[in-house]
Image (cartoon, rainbow, N blue to C red):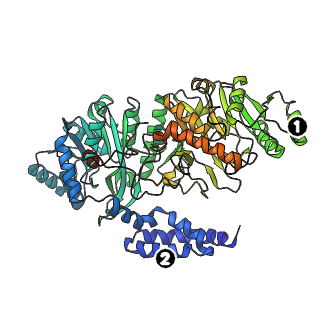
Amino acid sequence: MGIAQRLWDVLRPAAAVVLDWIRRRPWLHKPVHAIAVRLAKRRLFSMMIKEVLEEQYLTAYEYQQWVAANDTLTEADREAIRADVARMTDPPTISVIMPVYNSDPRFLQEAIGSVRGQLYPHWELCIADDASPAPHVWAILTQAAAEDPRIKIVRRTANGHISAASNSALELATGPFVALMDHDDLLPAHALYEVAAELQAHPEADMLFSDEDKVDSEGRRSDPHFKPGWNPELLLGQNLVKHLCVIRRELIAAIGGFREGFEGSQDWDLALRISEVTDRVRHIPAILYHWRQESGLTSFSVEQAERCQAAAGRAVSEHLARTGAPGARVELLRKGASFLAVERPLPSPAPSVSVIVPTRDRAELLARCVDGVLNRTDYPDLELLVVDNDSAEPETHALLERLKADPRVRILPAPGPFNYSRINNAAVRQARGEILLLLNNDVAVTKPSWLKELVAQAARPDVGAAGALLYYEDGRVQHGGVVLGVGGDPPVAGHLYAGARSVTRSYYSHLRLARNVSAVTAACLAMRKAVFEEVGGFDEENLAVAFNDVDLCLRIRERGYQIVWTPRAALIHLESASRGSDTHGAKAQRFGREIAYMRDRWGAVLDNDPYYGPNFDPAHVDYRLATPPRRVRPWLRSAGYGTVTGSATAQ
C-alpha cells in the first residue's frame, strides 16, 4: 500500500465530517469543486480527490449545471406541452393522493401549488388530514379546496398514521390512475403531462414510475436518482418506484389499498403487491419528483427509522413468500441503511450442477480454478467438465491426468481452432446437470457459498441466466453486469463499473444489490440446461469468441426470462489471461466481424439498454450523466423533432 493510500485511510473519517459540513452549505460547492479538480491533477492527491469527487453531495454543483442545461423548461417547452395536451385523445384524470399531518405551512402550500401549477390540467388532488392538531393545516386545505374545485379534502377524526390517511385520500379519488405524493414535496410543472403522454403511448400500463431528485428549502436540487427500467429484482433491495409512482386505481382497490402496520414503507409494500398482479410497468426516464430535504420537519420514515426498516423487511419477506421463495432471508444491507439484502434459498433437493471449464494450457490457472470448484465450494451435487482445447504443455497434461482420479471430473477433448461457442455447446450436450455453470479457467473461488447463490437464482422459473460479481486480482471490480451500447466504436457492450476500486461507493448501491440486467458475462454464468437448449445455445458461426454471452442473454430475454446479476456470488477473474487480447492481428479482424454481427443483429437493442438509461453517458460505465441526454422529450417528439431513444421500458 502506497503512502498516499495509507494517508487517505487515516484521513478518511475526518474528511467525511468535513464533506458533510460542505454538503450542507451549497454556496461552497462550486469553489470546492474547482479546487478539487485542480488538486486531482497532482499525483499525490489524485486518488483521494477522485474518491471525493465521486461523493454525490459534492457533485451537487455539477448536477445544478446539468439541470440548467437539460432539465429547465422554456416558455417554448410550455407552449409545446399545452399543444400536445390539446391533441390527446381521451386524456386520463390523474388523482394525486396526499396524506398530511401537522405539515409545515410553507411547504404544504408549495406542495399544493406545484400540483395546481401542472401544465396538464386533467388532475384532481385528494388530501386527507390525519387529525392534525395544528389548526393551520385544515385552514390551508379548506382555502385550497375553495379556490380550486379539483382539490378534494377530508379530515380524519382520529390519527391513523400514513397508511390509514393514504387510504382515506384514496377514497376521494375518481380518476383511473393514482399518483402518490408526500405533503411537503414538489412536482415539476410537466410531471403529470409526462405521465399522461406515456399512457397515451402505452395505454396498457398499470404502474408507472419516474426518476427523482431532492430539493432543499431554497429550491436547490441535488442527489438525482436516475433509475433503471422495471427491475423486479432490484425492487427487493430498494424502493425503486416510490417517487413519482402512478398506479391504476382499480388495481390498488383490488389488492386492498395501503396496509396498516407497514408505515414508512407502505408505498414499497404497495408496489411489491402490485407487481404480483401485473408486469405492465413503465419507467419514465425523467425527473418528475422533487423530494423535500432539510425542511425542518422529520418525516415518519426518518423519525421512526428502525420501525420503517422492519416494515420494509417484512414487506419484502412476505412478498417473497407469496411468490415462491418462502425461505428467503431478508436483512439490512448494512446497519443504518435503507436498502435490503436478500438471500434466496436453494430448491429442495438442490438441483445437480455441471460446471463447464474450457481450457488450453496454463496449468497454474486451471489448477487454481478447479481446486476452488472441487475443494472450496459448498454444494452437494456437482460435476466438473474440463474441456481441453488442444493443450500442449506437459504440466497441463499431468494436471488433467490427476483430475481424472476424481469421480466428479470428466475431461472432454475439444480439438481445433479456439471457438468458445462451439466448445461450450459440445460440453453442454454431454452435461448431466440440471443447471449449467459456465466458468472460465482464469476464475478463482473466494467464498464457498458462491455456487449456491447462483443456483438459487438460476433455478427460478422466471430467470434465464444469473451472473456474478467478479473482481480483478488487485481488488478492483471487473464485472458488475453487462451494459449495452457502451465502449468501442461502434459500441456493443461493456462491464458495469469495470475498474472501480470498491463496491461500497456504487450508484445507489448497485454493486451491492442483486439486479436485473441486460446480460452477464459467461466467465461465470449459471442457467438451466433446458433454457440453454430452448434458445439454441451459443452462436458458433457468427460469435466464436467475443460477445457470444451477450447474444445468448439477449436471446434469453427475447423469450421473456429475466437476467439476474448478484453480488452474493463474488469471485476473482483475470480476464482472458490464458487467451490474450482481441486487438491485434487476425484476432482483431475476427473481433471486428463479431462487432459488425452484433450491431446488425441487435443494434436497436444495444442502443437502448433499459437498465442504463438515456440520462447516462454511453462513453462510460459508471453512471456519469449524459449532456445532453439521449432522450427526445415527448412534447418535442409530438412536434416532429425525433423519436424517443432509451425511453421508458417495461422489463
- Rate crowding at label 2 as few (under 14), some (14 to 19) or many (20 or more) other CA atoms within 10 Å: few
User: Circle 2 — which element?
Assistant: helix
From the viewer's perspective, is 368 left or right of 459?
right
Element under disc 1: helix
Does residue 555 show up?
Answer: yes
Does residue 98 lie above or below 549 as drawn? below
**What is the x, y in percent for residue 110?**
22, 58
CA neighbours of label 1 inside 10 A, class few (<14), some (14 to 19), many (20+): some
Q: Indicate the quadrant where residue 499 lies.
A: bottom right
Residue found at the far left of this picture: 146
Type of residue at label 1?
His
Tell me which corner region of the image, top left, top right, bottom left or bottom right, holds residue 258.
top left
**Residue displayed at 57% across by 23% down:** 534
Q: 344 left or right of 439?
A: left
Q: Is residue 371 above or below residue 18?
A: above
Residue 59 falls left or right of residue 102: right
Q: Is residue 155 visible?
A: no
What percent of the width, then of the height, locates residue 413? Answer: 80, 30
On-image quarter of the N terminus? bottom right
Question: In this view of the protein, which residue sits in the foreground, 528 or 129?
Answer: 528
Front residue of 133/347: it is: 347
| Disc number placed over residue 635 in the picture, else none | none
Which mark is drawn over residue 35?
A: 2
**Residue at 32 percent of width and 47 percent of height:** 642
Residue 48's spot in the image, x, y percent? 58, 69
Quadrant into which the C terminus falls: top left
If you read the primary sequence from the N terminus, does the residue marked by circle 2 or circle 1 appear first?
2
The image position of residue 620, as x and y in percent, is 52, 55
Measured Cα–Cα span from mark 2 to mark 1: 58 Å
Residue picked out by circle 1: 397
